[in-house]
Image (spheres, rainbow, N blue to C red):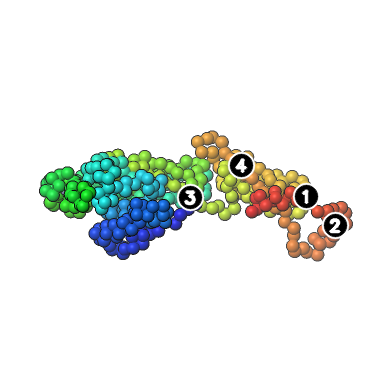
Amino acid sequence: MPVIKKDYYEVLAISREADDQTIKSAYRKLALQHHPDRNPGNSESEEKFKEAAEAYSILSDPQKRAAYDRFGHQGVQSAAGFDPSNFDISDILGDFFGFNDIFGSGGGGRKRNRPQRGEDVRYDLEIRFEDAVFGMTAEIQVPRSELCDRCSGKGAEPGTGATTCTSCHGRGEVVYQQSFLSVRRTCGHCGGSGQIIRTPCTQCRGRGYRQMQRKLKVNIPAGVDTGTRMRLTNEGEPGPNGGPPGDLYVVLKVKEHAFFERQEYDLHCIIPVNVAQAALGAEIEVPTLEQPHKLKVPEGTQTGAQLRLRHQGVAHLNGHTRGDIIVHIEVKTPAKLTRDQKKLFEQLRDTLPADNKPAEKGIFEKVKDYFA
Ligand SMILES: [Zn+2]
Ligand SMILES: [Zn+2]
């Protein structure tokens, strides 16, 4: 079931201009209010707690926040979606509750300096019907953070260095006593990095990353369909602290065709013929995705008859064969007749047997199958 995601700013009840401190205290308020320890068994609180954690995890990260501001949920969604079980709540709550100590995970501040794999990125791409059938090379532009080339991602202006943080002595966290708890807190002075940059890089303002538009070529093989996911290895977000980059997932949406409807590898279309063509048989021309094809309509063809053009459908993904075009014949009764035509029909009527018994019910199902 698709879930409509709430706006992260709404979740935290803050304005889009809110500064880091406001974001933090808004989250803190909600986290305290809805914390599972305080609301045992309350699933609504649990949901709110998770929503707030997710919102905070994005808005507290300048890179992710910038991506979210520009592209909405799309911009920060990992291909797998937000998974609260992967989200280390103690990392955030450690700052407020001293959870690192309670859960014994410890070293919350240090963890920030470990190389981590970059996030996976999802990119939705809409392509033409024909391009899905025959394949194509698409050029896309993906917003992505890239290591700042001026400071090589260090965040310091070239020629200047970082000095060890005097508040935490380079440890990235400070420990202090609060009532009976020993609380370990990310060092507020250096933001947990253990280092202070005296002269931030002028290009990235000390962040080490820049938001870039990256142009990529995507080879779309013949036979893809809506929902086909293509993975571009290492084209996701860069990994923090020198970790490997994530992957980019291109998710396809194929536009509708004017008259072909695709079912797996076959293409269906409805072609009208008149009563004379249906009764006597005819050769008609059927459009395909390439050249029009001649198709023989046999004598005595009924509405709903299915005729096949072999191997004119969609190429099988990773295969050499193609599906078929299936033509659904629709016999059209003429609605306007000239005087002469009317006479001919009247002669016809007098010679044709009238058989007006109700048909078996089954045929409705067969017709509905396709025209539904
Ligand atoms: Zn820089
Ligand atoms: Zn520090």
Quarter of the view holding residue 55: bottom left
Can see residue 53?
yes
Instruction: Kindly identify the amino acid type of the residue bearing the numbered disc 2.
Output: Arg
Which label sits in the foreground, 3 or 4?
A: 3
Q: Secondary structure at mark 1?
A: loop
Instruction: Kindly identify the amino acid type of the residue bearing the numbered disc 4.
Output: Asp
**Mark 3 sits near ligand 1, with its Cβ under 8 Å away:** no
Q: CA distance from mark 2 to mark 4?
A: 38 Å
Number of disc labels: 4
Marked residue nearer the N-terminal end (2 or 1): 2
Marked residue nearer the N-terminal end (2 or 4): 4
From the image, tell me which residue sits under label 3: 253
Q: Secondary structure at mark 2?
A: helix
Cβ atoms at labels 4 and 1 below 8 Å apart: no
Q: Secondary structure at mark 4?
A: loop
How far across and down, in percent of the image, does residue 338 sit?
A: 78, 64
For the point 16% across and 52% down, which residue is it?
189
Side of 300 relative to 123 (left or right): right
From the image, tell me which residue sits under label 1: 360
Instruction: Kindly identify the amino acid type of the residue bearing the numbered disc 1.
Output: Glu
How far across and down, in percent of the image, does residue 220 sit?
A: 45, 43
Marked residue nearer the N-terminal end (1 or 3): 3
> In this view, which residue lies farthest toward the right?
350
Can see residue 75?
no
Side of 341 relative to 17 (left or right): right
How far across and down, in percent of the image, does residue 210 sit?
A: 26, 51
Quarter of the view holding residue 12: bottom left
Instruction: Kindly identify the amino acid type of the residue bearing the numbered disc 3.
Output: Lys
**Mark 2 sits near ligand 1, with its Cβ under 8 Å away:** no
Q: Which mark is residue 349?
A: 2
